[in-house]
Image: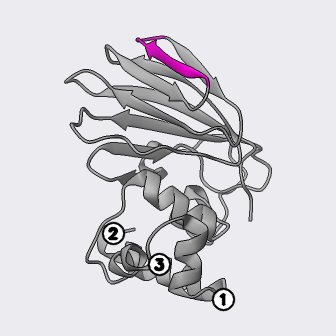
């Protein structure tokens, strides 16, 4: 999906869900002006913000960015078929195509260095992962503390736990992140 199609697709999903802009904004804990700007393609959401919007629309990255066609029965997913999404600070590669029998999602993430404050995230699924490359990152879990991560370190965050991961170095960090359970339509 092209970046300029994002707002149109969000508007379509919102209307399909029978939600007005104000109601979607309330559920996503955003301002109606922010939702309107995204839908009119005047603003591009971060991946964390997009995830909040999709969650409010009762969908996820895999379903939002994949075609309506389900993947075939082959156990191999070619890299050129993987959906890539980026917001300038992060890049997600959705490793699997939509398939009803896959019980989890795998995301290859690249997180770039940024001076901006990273937004808190909360998911209705468990998140686990491993840092494949990079020097230093900080994982903060609200109410529990913060931990430094280095290459080959792993992490686990239970569902509904507010958290954020910040790249502390100039070079990008690469992660493999697993979401369980995968949300299916």
Depth check, mark 3 against mark 1: the one in front is 1
Labels 3 and 1 touching (C-beta < 8 A):
no
Residue, x 55% and y 57% (percent of image)?
61
Q: Is residue 72 above or below residue 157?
A: below
Of the numbered discs 3 and 1, the one sitting upstream in the chain is: 3
Q: Is residue 107 above or below residue 129?
A: below
- Magenta segment boundaries in residue numbering: 144-152
Of the numbered discs 1 and 2, the one sitting upstream in the chain is: 2
Q: Bin the neighbour count of mark 1 within 10 Å (Cα to Cα): few under 14, some 14-19, many 20 and up.
A: few
Residue, x 41% and y 22% (percent of image)?
138
**Rendering coords of residue 122 (x, y %):** 59, 46
Residue tagged 3? 9
**Circle 2 SS class:** loop
Q: CA distance from mark 1 to mark 2?
A: 25 Å
Tag shown at residue 84: none
Q: Residue furthest right?
A: 101
Residue tagged 2? 2
Tag shown at residue 18: 1
Quadrant in the picture for residue 181: top right
Q: How is the model colour-coded?
A: one colour
Tell which of 36 and 183 is nearer to you: 36
- Give the quarter of the figure containing the N terminus: bottom left
Q: Is residue 71 left or right of residue 130?
A: right
- Give the quarter of the figure containing the C terminus: bottom right
Tell which of 141 and 143 is nearer to you: 143
């Amino acid at each position: 999906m092209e970046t300029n199609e994002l707002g149109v697709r969000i508007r379509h999903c919102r209307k399909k869900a029978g939600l007005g802009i104000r109601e979607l904004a309330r559920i996503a804990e955003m301002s109606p002006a922010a939702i309107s700007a995204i839908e009119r393609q005047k603003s591009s959401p971060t991946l964390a913000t997009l995830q909040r919007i999709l969650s409010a629309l009762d969908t996820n990255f895999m379903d939002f960015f994949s075609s309506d066609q389900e993947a075939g029965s082959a156990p191999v997913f070619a890299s050129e078929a993987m959906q890539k999404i980026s917001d300038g600070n992060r890049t997600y590669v959705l490793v699997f195509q939509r398939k009803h029998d896959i019980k989890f999602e795998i995301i290859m993430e690249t997180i770039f260095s940024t001076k901006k404050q990273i937004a808190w995230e909360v998911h209705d699924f468990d998140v686990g992962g491993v840092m494949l490359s990079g020097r230093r990152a900080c994982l903060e879990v609200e109410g529990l503390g913060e931990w430094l991560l280095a290459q080959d370190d792993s992490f686990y965050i239970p569902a509904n736990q507010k958290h954020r991961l910040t790249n502390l170095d100039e070079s990008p960090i690469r992660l493999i992140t697993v979401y369980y359970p995968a949300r299916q339509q």
